[in-house]
Image (cartoon, helix red, strand yellow):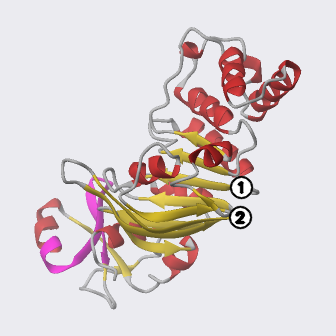
Amino acid sequence: MELQIEGLSKRYSNGTQALNNVSLSIGQGMFGLLGPNGAGKSTLMRTLATLQDADSGNVSLDGVDVLKERDAVRRMLGYLPQEFGLYPKVSAEDLLSHFAALKGIGDASERRATVSALLKQTNLYDHRRKALGSFSGGMKQRFGIAQALLGNPRLIIVDEPTAGLDPEERVRFHNLLSAIGEDVIVILSTHIVSDVSDLCRSMAIIHQGRVLVTGDPTALVNGLNGRVWKKTIPQSDVTACNQKHQVISMRLYAGRTLVHVLNEGQPAEGFEAAAPDLEDLYFATIKGFLQ
């Protein structure tokens, strides 16, 4: 099973070019779509979820035209949007049963069995009779995955699923996504680098509506071996460092500024070789240092 995206473009009425000739080939398993806010990720996700039109391009899922055969796509699709609204006074069990009926599971006994299984899979069964308004952020996201899994979808889209979750809930959500991502296509759209590095065997970086790089995260990071250098500098040297070097990132470390720069050899005295990671690749790519 494969999702093929060819030359997809979208410009909004205000002139924003949200997608610019996007082409991707996505197979089974977890695929990470990584980019900053405003990069075009949500536009692409909504287009794939048949919620908005593209201006041009083609998308196919196992021979189904995603842009034209919307009803067929929706029968194959599970979707967790970035903003997922819930009825706060309704129990998890009742609302998931309602969603199951909307998904076409008409037999009451089959619906009960499906709802029970999904609540167990997402570790919400013990909370099934609680009002959704009492759920934590992570529990709400797990409920969102439960509804996305209704109908045994072949394509699952999750848009910024871990934003705002505490570390414990993020780990729990990662484990859940990993468990469901073996036999179907799961597209994880996020600006959080660790989501992709932890979960995905294939990825793309998107920025300003364009796909800049795609491939295996480990192989892409290995391509930076010997090219990333680090140094701790005082705050007073930050401006000069930015002017002299291709600065990938800066962060505070023990009250001083730790910089990572991209260079084919040691850029200056005091710099040490750094083992590159996905964050280095991400920032170097969106800053235009990698061509």
Q: Relative to residue 150, is residue 11 depicted above or below?
A: below
The residue under the point 74% across, 49% down is 179
What amino acid type should be assigned to the residue bearing mark 2?
Met
Asked whether disc 1 touches disc 2, contact meaning CB atoms under 8 Å apart, the reply is yes
User: In which quadrant of the rendered view does residue 176 lie?
Assistant: top right
> x%, y% of residue 185?
66, 57
Graded by Cα atoms within 10 Å as few (under 14), some (14 to 19) or many (20 or more), the crowding at tag 2 reads: some
Q: Relative to residue 85, is residue 219 depicted above or below?
A: below
Is residue 279 something that shows in the picture? no
Q: Which mark is residue 1?
A: 2
Graded by Cα atoms within 10 Å as few (under 14), some (14 to 19) or many (20 or more), the crowding at tag 1 reads: some
Quadrant that contains the C terminus: bottom left
> x%, y% of residue 270?
28, 80
Q: Which residue is mark 1?
A: 184
First-in-chain label (1 vs 2): 2
Q: Nearer the viewer, residue 94 or 276?
A: 94
The residue under the point 66% across, 64% down is 63
The residue under the point 70% across, 51% down is 154
Q: Which residues are magenta?
A: 242-261
Magenta: predominant secondary structure element? strand
User: In which quadrant of the rendered view does residue 183 lie?
Assistant: bottom right
Asked whether 249 falls inside the magenta stretch, the response is: yes
User: In which quadrant of the rendered view does residue 282 lie?
Assistant: bottom left
Query: Left or right: where does residue 75 sit relative to residue 82?
Result: right
- Alpha-carbon span between mark 1 and mark 2: 8 Å
